[in-house]
Image (cartoon, helix red, strand yellow):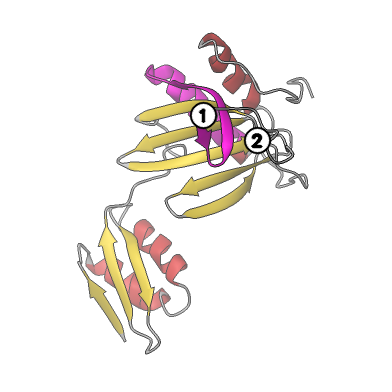
């Protein structure tokens, strides 16, 4: 049995949910988004021992980097993701997902936001899927669109990033090409780059 609460749904959304939720709540959630043109998403899924699923459907917020437009807000970070012995990491007034922040800049120009987000999107799309067995991130961005905020903690050296979307985290392969774009905007803002960064021509 399926119990759906706080509905803001359409017939298509209900049909998709009934058809696929028994297989995978996550898959059903994604298909609901597709079936309604991104108008809603599964906001909360609770599985009970008796097999009842409680679901809240709310507005779908797209990935701020995935769309063709610039994110509404974008903050670019320089972080130091090197491995340190306990107590040896550099002192920093702020940490971003556990990494010392060397500096950050709010990108207010829409063209610059689009360039940064576009570079990351291309780096994700052009990856062949390979990732090195390491993670020493030196860049990060926080992108916001339609109230949805996603943090990307990026290690270009190791060809991978962590995407933090609320309480969920995913690891994705990425090329090194976006690094030069990120560095350009950090340098323009007078923000130091993290030590030990891989050369941009590699």
Which residue occupies the extreme bottom position in the image? 50
Instruction: Tell me if I can see residue 49 in this picture.
Output: yes
Q: Is residue 103 left or right of residue 126?
A: left
Looking at the image, do the residues carrying marks 2 and 1 touch, with CB atoms under 8 Å apart?
no
- Bin the neighbour count of mark 2 within 10 Å (Cα to Cα): few under 14, some 14-19, many 20 and up: many
Could you tell me which residue is drawn at 53 percent across and 41 percent down? 97
Residue drawn at x 64%, y 19% is 193
* As drawn, 157 above or below 171: above
- Image location of residue 13, percent across then percent down: 29, 66
Q: Nearer the viewer, residue 100 or 174?
A: 100
Q: Is residue 113 magenta?
A: yes
Image quadrant in which the C terminus is located? top right
Q: Position of residue 132 (x, y in %)?
A: 77, 44
The residue tagged with tag 2: helix, strand or loop?
loop
Q: Which residue is mark 2?
A: 137
Judging depth in this view, the residue of 138 and 71 nearest the camera is 138
- Quarter assignment of residue 101: top right
Residues rendered magenta in the picture: 94-123
Q: Residue furthest front?
A: 87
131 relative to 26, above or below: above
In the picture of the structure, the residue carrying the numbered disc 1 is 118
């Amino acid at each position: 049995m399926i119990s759906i609460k706080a509905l803001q749904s359409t017939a298509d959304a209900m049909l998709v949910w009934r058809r696929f939720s028994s297989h995978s709540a996550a898959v059903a959630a994604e298909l609901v988004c597709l079936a309604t043109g991104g108008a809603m998403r599964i906001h909360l899924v609770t599985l009970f021992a008796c097999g009842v699923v409680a679901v809240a459907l709310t507005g779908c917020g797209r990935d701020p980097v995935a769309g063709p437009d610039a994110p509404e807000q974008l903050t670019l970070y320089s972080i130091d993701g090197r491995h340190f012995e306990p107590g040896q990491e550099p002192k920093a007034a702020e940490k971003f997902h556990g990494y010392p922040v060397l500096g950050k800049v709010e990108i207010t120009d829409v063209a610059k936001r689009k360039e940064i987000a576009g570079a990351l999107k291309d780096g994700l799309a052009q990856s062949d899927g390979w990732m090195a067995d390491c993670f020493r991130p030196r860049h990060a961005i926080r992108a916001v669109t339609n109230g949805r905020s996603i943090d990307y903690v990026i290690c270009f050296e190791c060809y991978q990033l962590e995407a933090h979307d609320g309480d969920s985290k995913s690891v994705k392969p990425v090329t090194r090409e976006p690094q030069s774009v990120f560095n350009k905007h950090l340098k323009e803002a007078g923000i130091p780059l993290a030590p030990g960064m891989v050369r941009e021509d590699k």
